[in-house]
Image (cartoon, rainbow, N blue to C red):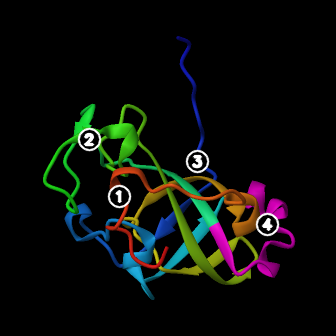
Amino acid sequence: MRSVEFTPIGIIHTPIKDRKDAPRQSRLGRDIAGIIEIDKQYERGLTDLETFSHVVLIFHLHLSKDFSLMSKPPVDDKYHGVFATRSPRRPNPIGISVVRLEKVEGNILHVLDVDMVDGTPILDIKPYIPEVNSGDPIRYGWLEGRVEDK
């Protein structure tokens, strides 16, 4: 298979300095503030982003050095395939989080509910639109009964 290369569009600055202190998902990072510094060459692409309350961040899990095809999540006592989990130890260390967008100032985004370590490279930003992201009935697989606030 051919390789794919990405260039970060920016970096996030957060109070989380060590990955062991990072929440397992953005919902668990409630009210943790972050500042995303987008490279000036991409600033125009932020036009109208401030009209959304939430954004999806796609980022490089730059501190993840290896992967495992099986993972034992903290909410279960058995192993699952890595693609059936949100483990950061993935063949392609890419993370996604939905965060609240407070404001946009030029090339700077102020966000809340971050779960990323300080210095995490941001690969892309998309507006979060629940109706687009989940229009059909949702199945929670092995997480059924373990997920709060469905």
Q: Is disc 4 placed on a helix, strand or loop?
A: helix
Looking at the image, tell me whether mark 3 or mark 1 is earlier in sequence order: 3
Mark 1 surroundings: few (<14), some (14-19) or many (≥20) residues within 10 A: few
Q: Please state which of the two labelled residues, at mark 2 or mark 1, is closer to the viewer.
A: 1
Looking at the image, tell me whether mark 2 or mark 3 is earlier in sequence order: 3
Tally of marks: 4
Q: Residue type at mark 3: give it.
A: Pro
List x then y, in percent, for residue 38.
65, 63
Gap in angstroms between the C-alphas marked 4 and 3: 15 Å
Looking at the image, tell me whether mark 1 or mark 4 is earlier in sequence order: 4
Q: Which residue is mark 1?
A: 143
Gap in angstroms between the C-alphas marked 2 and 4: 38 Å
Q: Which residue is mark 4?
A: 46
Q: Is residue 146 above or below residue 139?
A: below
Q: Residue type at mark 2: give it.
A: His
Residue at 57% from the left image edge and 29% from the top image edge: 5
Q: Which residue is mark 3?
A: 8
Residue 124 visible here = yes
Circles 2 and 3 in contact, beta carbons < 8 Å: no
Q: Which mark is residue 4?
A: none
Q: Please state if 38 lies on the left or on the right of 146 as rendered.
A: right
Residue at 86% from the left image edge and 73% from the top image edge: 48
Q: Which mark is residue 80?
A: 2
**Depth check, front residue: 126 or 34:** 126
Range drawn in magenta: 40-55
Q: Is disc 3 placed on a helix, strand or loop?
A: loop
Q: Is disc 2 placed on a helix, strand or loop?
A: strand
Residue at 82% from the left image edge and 60% from the top image edge: 45
